[in-house]
Image (cartoon, coloured by chain):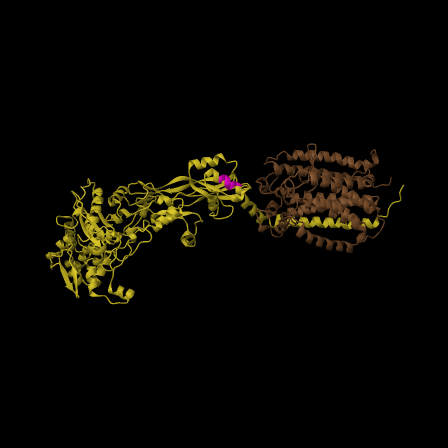
Amino acid sequence: MRIYEDLRAVQDRLVVAQRLVLGLMLALLAAFWHLQVLKNRYFLELAESNRIRNVPLVAPRGLLLDRGGNLLVENRASFNILLTPEHAEDLDVTVARLAEALQLDEAAVRERLATRPARFRPAVIRADASFADVAALEARRLELPETGVEVVPLRAYPMRSAAAHALGRVGEVSERQLEQEAFAMVAPGTFIGQAGLEARYNAELMGRDGVRRVVVNSRGAEVAEAERTPPVDGPPLTLTLDASLQAALERAFAGRRGSAAALDPETGEILALGSLPSYDPNAFATGVDTATWRALIGDPMRPLMNRVIQGQYSPGSTFKPIEAMGALAEGVITPQTNIYCPGYLSIYNTVFRCNRPEGHGSIDLRRALAVSCNVFFYQTGVRLEIERIARWSRRFGLGSATGIDLPAEAAGLVPSPEWKQRVFRTPWYAGETVSVAIGQGQLNVTPMQMARATAALAVGKLVQPHLVKAIAGRPVEWPAAQDLGFAPEHLEAVRAGMCDVVGPGGTGWRARVPGVEVCGKTGSAQVVNRARLQRDGAENELIRPHGWFIAFAPRERPRIALAVLVENSGSGAEGAAPVAREILAHFFRVAAPPAPPAVPATATAEAP
Amino acid sequence: MAIDRRLLANLDGPLLLAVSLLCGIGIATIWSATKATVHAELYLKQLTAIGLGLVGMAVVASLDYRRLADRAPFFYAASLLALSYVLFFGPRIAGTRRWLLLGGAQLQPSEFVKLAAALFVAKVFAESRKDELGLGDVVPSGLAVGLLSLLIAAQPDLGTAFCLVPLFLAVALLAGLRVRAVLTLALVGVLAGALGWNFALRDYQKSRVYTFLDPSTDPRGAGYQTIQSQIAVGSGGLTGKGFGNGSQVQLGYLPARQTDFIFSVLAEELGFVGVAVVLSLYLFVLWRALETAQLARDRVGAYLAAGLAATLAFQVVYNVAMVAGLVPVKGLPLPFLSYGGSSVLASLLGIGLILNVRMRRFAN
């Protein structure tokens, strides 16, 4: 039997140990109280954002229909192949497998990964994937749990390049756009309208995206759906365009460059609007690839430009009816005024030539319009003077944007002494008035402005041109046509001249349509001066004048007004009038007349 | 040696009950943590381990602890052998060599080494008859325990290796080691730490320390565990999200949820109330263990119970603090709760030793 050891010192120290343990446990309890009770809300939110992922439900953009209800722009379901790299256990393996399944380069997959908007958000590895891609991926579902397929509505343009400039295109919202207030609600990566009606009516067309709140596990796989707010489709837009007339218009150009707009002269509804060369907006629906973009941007023929509202040209002789209306209204001429044309006008120490070197003799307004006599209008312009020419030009809507519902419209230019003083700080030369009087000089117009001015000649009213008739079936209120207050006999005089343009001996006979009384006016816009044109015109097509033709029909109660510009076609009579004829023939459902006799394209065959 | 009636009468029933409750809570929590996974049957394996552990506990309690302490050198030698064997011949699992394959079972010798070390330290300090100990008195035994610790650290298993430090320090302090000596030791420790940081620690170990200092630097990597565990704990609130209903647990955000982070499962699903209950049970177990040390009839018994209590306290406090994001993540199981046969078995055997000391507190 052993003696009891003296353990008192040890026992005292053990009491300290007990207290230490008690203290530690209380400290731990305090820490858990802090985390679980005091900071509970904060951590609940974190747990919730772990658990819940918001998956946007992209609202399909509104459809675009023509005036007859034909589909111009629609949406089709497309598949995007997604990859969320954070969910991959070994990203290299995942990338390699995915590249193999999609028959892509690994580098290409990594390049796409770099484009995603934020961490933990999937990157679109292949947009608009084929069924074969989707099937290949589904077959490897178990090997690639971090990949996914999403179905998104994709913009589709079934008419391909037709009316591309009016309809526009979509594209990913740019960083600069994201800074603008108009796109405050748009998330990065969203596709928005980037041109044409798609851009102009983007806010309406986008509708409202919905959202699915889904419960996801730690690998990002969806476990359940917590909540769903369905998307609200963008409302359909009914356009004023007529798909069949649009097709006829583009066909009429037969591969030539230029543009044309046709509208209802009473209402301003645009029936057809084409700019050529065009492009296929389908190429932009998933984000355009760099090569295609470079090709479009670098093309010297500028297919992305909407020539109807962005091309600015001298109106040439198509300006003459406008000037005539001003001169009649101001009383500097009457319908009966005769002016002698010797084939030139010598004034201000300069000789201004007529288009007919031997002269037209004594000529009145009606005949002067029909044969496009320059001397008659030189004289008229000199009498009217530049300020009044400018004022009347503006009354026809020249020199300012028409306000058509398309973005980035050019204003054109109506020159005046005041303008010249402001921009060039030089006085106006009287000789410049003579040039402006036949639509040359600094005067610049867009085909849209000319189409509208032609409608004004047809009905005496200035309309608001527009492309959208109704949104979601509700008519859009456009400003009413503005009566220009012309005297009926003045309007009648100019119309008579314009009808003779298409009649026997008129410059625009190639625009004649059987059974329809067409009124028109030819014109050509010089690109370079006469001397250079005669020297180089034969080999350099791009310096040849642009051909204009403006027209309305029928003469009584006109139903259509149009302006056609064919670039570098030499003259309006040969280049533009036949195009106008085909458009009008289609509009009036007349069998296309036989093609006009082939005339060698010479630059000086006709009036400037 | 037969268990006589007097011994049975002195069995610490409340301690046994508290430990059983902890084991039961552990099984339930493991079930909840794994029910939605391919490991859904793990709670059954844990149940088996607990059953084995209770049998082992009875066996250990029935042998007089003094006799066991007399064989401490043998246990120490066996520990060295097992640890060396594992280090050189053990299977490599998840980059570590911790396991001993015995038949179909995997054993983690390091868990049992803690028991051997407790017996060894108790025996060595009980032999000393000084009232006050200087640094020189503890160096030889310190080196002996340090060797075990180093072998475990080399597996690598820093958590378990470090468990031997509080064991040794607690017994040494009880035996009269001067506080000044402990401070000197701490200084040496800091120096050793600095050297270890530069020459011994592996990158993943360093990154854990960095990540602990600022978990947000690597939210998907090493800091992920800490962040997710804190979210689980914090979002549990006062009463929890309900048993089997923790989103962090059930959706798989919580790593190592049936092993090192099991306490975070409990905190999320049962809330602060569950946390308080379990911490109270641990406090009770530790309190009884330290009480046993006070009641022990001799130094060996007191040191053995106190040493075991120290390791247990260290493991519980460190693990729970880790779950709360207060200390860096280390692979350290929570005794009785975490899934793991070796851990449960060794913990129950340790309780067996403590029961043993208390049963034999009266002279004989």
In front of the other: A247 or A278: A278
The vertical placement of B355 against A604, above or below, is: above
Give the colour of chain A.
yellow
Task: Look at the image and tell me whether residue B106 can be seen.
Answer: yes
Residue A97: within the magenta? yes
Residue B331: within the magenta? no
Q: Position of residue B3 (x, y in %)?
A: 82, 34
Q: Quadrant of the N terminus of chain A?
A: top right
Q: Position of residue A265 (x, y in %)?
A: 23, 49
In front of the other: B360 or B137: B137
Q: Position of residue B180 (x, y in %)?
A: 78, 56
Q: Position of residue B334 (x, y in %)?
A: 68, 42
Give the colour of chain B.
brown
Which residues fall within the magenta stretch?
A: A93-98
The quadrant in which residue A68 appears is top left
In front of the other: B29 or B122: B122
The quadrant in which residue A392 appears is bottom left
